[in-house]
Image (cartoon, grey):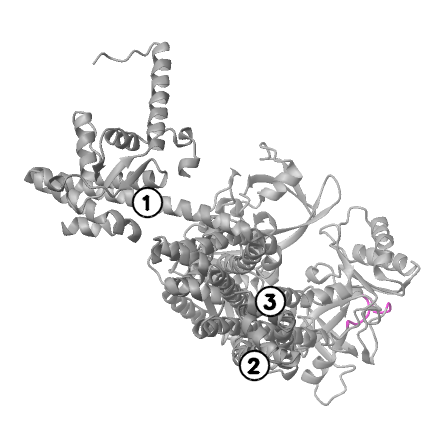
Amino acid sequence: MGNDARPDSLLPLPPAVFHILMALADEDRHGYAIIQEVLSRTSGEVRLSPGTLYRSIQRMLEDDVIVEINERPAPELDDERRRYYRITTFGRSVARAEANRLHELVRLARASGFHTRKA
Amino acid sequence: MLFYRALLRLYPKSFRAEYGAEMMQDFTRGWRDASTAARAALLAQAGVDVAVNALGVHLDILKQDVGYAVRSLRRTPGFTVTAIVVAALGIGATTAAFSTADHVLLRPLPFAEPEHLVRLTENHASLGYPRIEPSPPNYQDWKRMQTSFVSIEAFNGSTSSLVGSGEPERIMGASVAGGVFAILGRQATIGRTLTEADIQDQTNHGVVISDRLWRTRFASDPNVLGRTLTLDDATMAIIGVMPPDFHFPYRGTDFWRALRFGSAPSNNSRGNNYLEVMARLNPGVTLDQAQSEMRTIADQIAQQFPKEQAGKSVNVQRYRDDVGPQSRLLIWAVVGAALCVLLIACTNLANLLWSRALARRTELAVRAAVGASLDRLVRQMLTDSLVLAGAGGILGVLLAVVAAPMVVRLVPTALPIAEAPPLDLRMLAVAAVVTLITGSAFGVLPALRVCRKTDGSALKDGARGGTSRGTERVRSALVIVEIVASVVLLVSAGLLVQALMKVQAIDPGFRSEQVLTLKTLLPRPKYSASVRRLQFYQQVLDDTRALPGVQSAAYVSFTPFTMRGGMWEVLTTTPDPGNVGGFAAPADVRRAALRMVTPDYFETIGIPVLQGRDVSAADTIDTPAVAVVSRSFAEQYYPGQDPLGRQFGYAFAVRTIVGVVGDVRFRGLERDNSEPQVYLAAAQHPEGQIGFYAPQDLVIRTSVPPAALMSAVRNVVRRADPQLPITSMRTLEEVVALETAPRVVQLRVLGAFAVVAFLLAAIGIHGLLAYTVRARSREIGVRIALGAKARDIVTMVMGRSAVMAVIGVTIGAVLAYAAGRSMQALLFGVDPANPAVFAAAIALALLMTLAGSLLPALRAVRVDPITATRAE
């Protein structure tokens, strides 16, 4: 698995996995920070439960879309018991592929007359 | 917090170790931030979240492990196939045996509230008949007097010729009382069943037919109601069709008609025991209460009719328990044998997995070194064994289905159930449970023992290729268990062989070789007249005797072993019209089996005439009634006297003894042969009496193979009456062989188990020794290098197997003796400690050990000391 696999082989991504990838897009985070980030990105609509989060993380580590990192943030921000995760290059390709897939789906929906509501 | 910590235990240990602390922390933070009101919701959410995700994680691991197991098993096809076959044999044998036991002994009968159904029989234990069919008057009295039952109902199985389009066919049916279908609680699929009103209306000729008859004879016609069926000479109108799983009172019953008691004197006789009687317990009445009420009723009847009924009582027994003790014992013996096979299969599997685990120690050590936890490795190995057992289980169910026809022949025909246990959820559940036990119990042991040592030392240990003493000991113990189980099975099968040979050696009282038998059922009223019957016999016998290859031929009421009763009272010569049989009874009760014969019967079937003469053509309805009696009759009723010329009242006439012949075991090979028998001349059979005994069985002694005459004899009968169905055409040897058929089946089943066990045990011994030799090849190489001779090496390897064999055989012999004693009822007097059987079984077990260790020993001799020592 992992780097030998093509990004497409993991699609479609479970929503939780996609959210976690997006939360890690700009910054390495620990578990609780991921939950918070997803919550704020979705204006409180998506709250990942710890069970879902860590089960997804376990799978994502096995699939090499994220890695656990040893570098720690500035000591005053660090919580020693926390483990930090970073999206991999492969993870970025996977996220991009998923975004494309969803984009294509929305395009098809629109072509069929299903217009999305204006935000 | 404690709650959440407990919840986390649902996760696999490895996952908990990785993420547990963080999850705990996250939850604590959420808890702190939540208001008191929100906390209850938080707890509920956490419960659901952890339960769902923990299950998900378990499934993820399982999926991975199964994938890994399948990939790694594929790399070792030899091992995989052996393990699957071994598991399949054990699981298949156990599933087949348990399903049969379930089907025959445990599963509820296919009737409404079957636990309330009972069978009633008369108990004449004082006369040597603990269970005998009730007579019509007793049945009617019970029915009238009882309060324990919803109702008591009688039925009576019979066969009839189905005539009409095509060949006449003999079919089995039953005459049933009006309430039988009601207490069984079964409905017809088309039309209706028989009711009390049908019985009361003497002009009613309604018949209910089986699903089979409806399909074969009426092409599943949905408008079958009202169509007619000609049974013997009666034309009956179909009023209903029963569902396919209705097998009452026996398997293969094709029609049900009204049971009516005519005015014939025999139906008023309390000694005319031929009915079968069942009843349904009233709600709240126990079996014991019903039994004690019926005993009271029997006592009251006995007071009223002291002469006929003194000392007689009633048995009340659950319908489910209507399985003879022999059948019950046999089925449990088969289950025991299957468990032995399963035990052997499991120990074999454990040893196979063990060898594999040891061979993979290096791989496991590497996985442990890169962070796999102990529970993760054990789990992986357990998955391996479960995958193997699962594949074996699927194959085993197929085996069980294929083996079923053999095992189901052990199912007694007297139960109203289908012949074969159905392949249903119950059978699959048994297979699944056995598979799980096989896979888990015997996979865990090697997994734990091997993995526990999987630390840094295992890397070196694996490279050195040795095995620990403890492991060797446990594995040797497993092989010893296999030897024990196979000795037990070999001895059991051997004892059954001895019993079979003993039964086959019994003299039945006649000579069965070169005799053809068949039945020509003479329907009434066409053949009610004696003259008509005698004409028929004469024509068939004359034409048969004229056939080339026929030495002699005769007619008899029943070929031996085809009717096991027919007892009549032997009376005085003083007329007494009030008594059944027409004469006064002597002081003691005397009985004898009644058969009617045409001249030459004794010569044809090979019963020796010891004194006097055979019945002859000169004995007619106009001459005094004669009787030929058996030796036991003469010895019991005329001890120390010349029986010839003596007279007795029997079956409505005074009979004069003209001859004495040898005894025949008419009740069966394994029954006592001292029951008195009386043969009457068919030509002296008076009009309208005891029609049941009118000869219908033709026996022919031939000088050519009997089978060669079959079509010629068929033509002879067809010339005499083209309408007559011919049934049961077979050689007398086949009739005799049927007597031992149940034993042959028992033997085949148990023998098959013994053979499987034997082979599995040989594989087990071979597997263990082959592994040991491989693991110790360096040591062997060193020994050879130091000058050990081939003989020393062989002694070393074989010595080990000899020790295991001696221990296994000793324990096995003791257990086999215990098993033999517990199945003594099946052994027909063969001593459970039969020395020949034990010697043979022990020799076979030793031979098996020898054969199993031969290849590993040869391989040990061929170890090249240079390669072996350099390899590592």
Q: Chain of mark 1?
A: B
Q: Chain of mark 3?
A: B
Badge 1 amino acid: Val
1 or 3: mark nearer the eye: 3
- Tell me if residue B544 can be seen: yes
1 or 2: mark nearer the eye: 1
What residue is pinned by disc 3? B867
Q: Is residue B255 above or below residue B547?
A: above
Spatial CA distance of label 1 from label 2 is 50 Å
Picture coordinates of residue B171, whole percent (x, y): 66, 50
Q: Main secondary structure of the magenta part?
A: loop
User: Which element type, helix, strand or loop, lies under badge 3?
Assistant: helix
Magenta stretch in the rendered image: B617-626
Badge 2 amino acid: Val
What residue is pinned by disc 1? B57
What residue is pinned by disc 2? B806
Residue located at (59% from left, 39% from top): B238
Residue located at (41% from left, 59% from top): B365
**Label 2 and label 3 in one chain:** yes
In the foreground, B439 or B465: B465
User: Which element type, helix, strand or loop, lies under badge 2?
Assistant: helix
Q: Residue furthest left?
A: B36
